Structure formats: C-alpha cells, structure tokens
Amino acid sequence: MIRILYIEDEKEIGQWVSKELTERGYDVTWLKSGEGLEQHISSKDIAILDVMLPGLDGFSIGKRIKRENKDLPILMLSARTAVEDKIEGLHFADDYLTKPFHPDELVARLEVLLRRYQKNDDVLALQHLKIYTKDMQVINTMNEEEILLTGKQFYLLQYFIRHLNQILTKEQLYEGVWGESYIEGDKTLMVHIRYLREKIEINPAKPMIIETIRGIGYRVKQ
C-alpha cells in the first residue's frame, strides 16, 4: 500500500482529500501542520504539502523533508497561481498543483511521481508470479515470460496488491479502480476479474490468486 504524508490545515479540504485518497487504496497520514513531521519522513512513499500552513509554511517544510529524505517525492498544493510561487515551489518539490483541482488529476500526478521514484528491485512473489510492485510488470516464473495486462487489468491488480490479504467488497473495488459508485447488478467488475484471471491464474476455472469470498467480494492472499 502506498503511504502518503499529507499536510493541510483547512479541515474541509483535508477531510475531502484524505477521503478521496483512502477510498482509492492509499494509506494517508494527515497532519494539520509541520509539528511531528520528523517521525513520518522515513516511513512514507510520497508527501503532499499545502503552501499556506500555520507556523512553518509548505515551502519551508518541503525543504526540510528533502534535506532529511531526498528520495521522497513532494507534490505541492496551493491556491497561489503566480508564476513566482510555482518557481519557488519547484526549486525543491517535484510537482505543483493549484487549487481547485479534481481528485483524478491529483491521483494521476501522484502516480507519475511514484513511477519516477520507483525502485526496480521492489518485487512481490505471488505463487507463480513475480510482480514488480512499482511499475506492475508481471512475470510468469514458470516460463519467465511477461504477462501483458490492459490498463484496467493493471489498475485492478494494483488495487489488490495495495490491499493484500484484505477482503474487498465489490463496492470498494469498483470505486477504487473506476472512481465511481458501484451499481448493484453491474457486471463490469466481474468481467474484468474473469479476464484478469485468464491471464494470471494457472487454472482460471479454479483460481488460486484472486479468491472469491462468496456474498462479499474478493481477496488476494500472499
């Protein structure tokens, strides 16, 4: 699961962003200021910083983070649109997003930064699969061939990987991957899971990787 450090002092915005990211499968630690920052820097995968904060502003906090962990990507959020502010932020941060923004754009920018900082040696062994968890390259170790996934299959497997060993409902999966509310009776998720199983399971008729939890949803166990 991707661990996000999110610093935002405005309650409504903080709740909204935290909720959106959590529903999409991220682990979010939300702070309202830079207080207590040090204990989180080494344990997170990415940081999202608002510029206007009580005490130290986002620029000062971002520079401190980069001094402590230069490999931690930083996305700045701000209502400031002046070129000078963006330039100041981009002196140390990796991206700068102005408010208001759509959550889909926020997630897209996060994923770009995560791929940019990815480590190719982050590998998950899952039965006969070798999964490079940062770029989601999937190798069948029985023949050492790559299993090519479509975009939606990629995001579906990625969501399962972020929630290993957890039982996920159809509602959670649909909202996490498609970004929309699940409608009872919709076969989209079921069809995509069937196609994904046909690619990654040894015997799709008796799946061992994507487990069906009858009456609830699905689970991928390590």
Image (cartoon, rainbow, N blue to C red):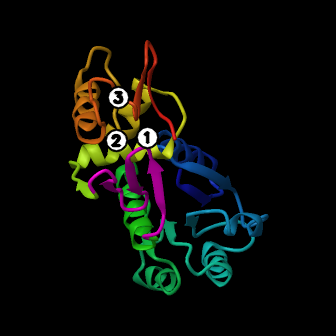
Q: Residue at x 30, y 48 (%)?
A: 154
Seen in the image, is 157 located left or right of residue 166? Answer: left
Mark 3 and 2 residues: CB-CB less than 8 Å, in contact? Answer: no
**Secondary structure under the numbered disc 3 in the rendered image:** loop
On the image, the x and y values in percent for residue 85 come to 48, 80
- Are there few (<14), some (14-19), or many (20+) residues within 10 Å of tag 1? many
Return the mark for residue 156. 2
Q: Residue at x 44, y 79 (%)?
A: 86
**Could you tell me the amino acid type at mark 3?**
Pro
Label 1 vs label 3, nearer the camera: 3
The image quarter in which residue 48 lies = bottom right
Seen in the image, is 59 located left or right of residue 34? Answer: left
The image quarter in which residue 31 lies = bottom right
Q: Which residue is mark 1?
A: 160
Q: Residue at x 56, y 73 (%)?
A: 72
Residue 14 in magenta stretch? no
Mark 1 and 2 residues: CB-CB less than 8 Å, in contact? Answer: yes
Q: Residue at x 53, y 41 (%)?
A: 19
- In the image, the segment drawn in magenta is 120-143
On the image, the x and y values in percent for residue 78 come to 50, 67
**Could you tell me the amino acid type at mark 2?**
Leu
Earlier sequence position, callout 1 versus callout 3? 1
Image height of 170 relative to 214, above or below: below
On the image, the x and y values in percent for residue 46 come to 54, 65
